[in-house]
Image (cartoon, rainbow, N blue to C red):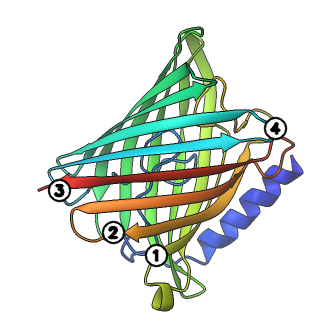
Amino acid sequence: MHRWKMVFVLLAVFNWGTVYGEAVAAGSANGMTLNGATGLILVPDARIGWENASMGVDAGYGFVWNGGSHVEHLPRLSLSLFGRVELSTLFQIDQGSLENGVLGAKFQLYRDSGTVLALGTDWEFSPSKKDSGKLYLAVTYGGDFFRLPAVTSAVMGWQYWENGRISSQFIYGMGFSLSLLPDTLRDFLYWVTDFSNFSYAMHGASVSAEVRGAFNTGLRIHPIKDGPFNMVIDLIGTDLLDQGRGLSATVSGGWAFQ
């Protein structure tokens, strides 16, 4: 419980230091979460992969390693439509077999230069487990933190379906993306952090949020970001406040059709 309080105090201090109304694009790179939706690490944000194109496609691959020889492989795919809608999917592969999959959808309800609001949902299916689903509301806004461009995102919602039955589980998450040395590195390197009481999947996820939630942090590299192409590389420490801490590396990229 004390670890939860510590994390939320840190994030609250970050929010207090943020100046509202600046462009959401500053301080963030449109990267994939571990389950395929556009966002931070586990926490989806209110953005979509391609907001200035009629259609865009992104594909990614990542893994989570918790020590030993066990590695979860996470190929992902997302489709952006009409500058407002995002459809995403994750396949979780364990020792060469499909463990489960997640289908996601996100719709932007409101967007201006400073704030974005979106409604999203996930549906998880598995060959061996019953289905689960959640519904969430995400808000993303831009600002400065110690004069560095930053973007903060918060999510809250409802795990309405769990293991084939109605659930009353409340879900929440929060995090930020901070551009490091923007004058020198020109928005190629970001510090990303999030905390949530949910993971990228209900079953078999190597990042466990069941006990104290999951705190994740690391670097996001954005080597290709101009024109119709995009590429993002994440190097992340996962669930760092618990014994199940691990490492994750992901790469994703895509292109837009005007």
Mark 1 vs mark 4: give the one in front: 4
Q: Earlier in the sequence, mark 1 or mark 2?
A: 1
Could you say whether the residue bearing mark 1 is in a helix, strand or loop? loop
Mark 3 vs mark 2: give the one in front: 2
How many numbered callouts?
Answer: 4
Q: Which residue is the site of mark 3?
A: 53
Residue at 44 percent of width and 71 percent of height:
142
Q: Are marks 4 and 3 in contact (CB under 8 Å)?
A: no
Q: Earlier in the sequence, mark 4 or mark 3?
A: 3
- Residue 58 drawn at (x, y percent): 33, 47
Residue at 84 percent of width and 52 percent of height:
3
Could you say whether the residue bearing mark 3 is in a helix, strand or loop? loop
In this rendered view, identify the residue nearer to me: 144 or 109: 144
Report the Cα–Cα distance between label 2 and label 4: 35 Å
Report the Cα–Cα distance between label 3 and label 1: 22 Å
Q: Quadrant of residue 175?
A: bottom right
Q: Which residue is the site of mark 4?
A: 68
Residue at 61 percent of width and 78 percent of height:
17
Report the Cα–Cα distance between label 1 and label 2: 9 Å
Amino acid type, callout 3: Ala
Mark 2 vs mark 4: give the one in front: 4
Q: Are marks 1 and 2 in contact (CB under 8 Å)?
A: yes
Q: Which residue is the site of mark 2?
A: 225
253 relative to 64, above or below: below
Is residue 251 among what the camera can see? yes
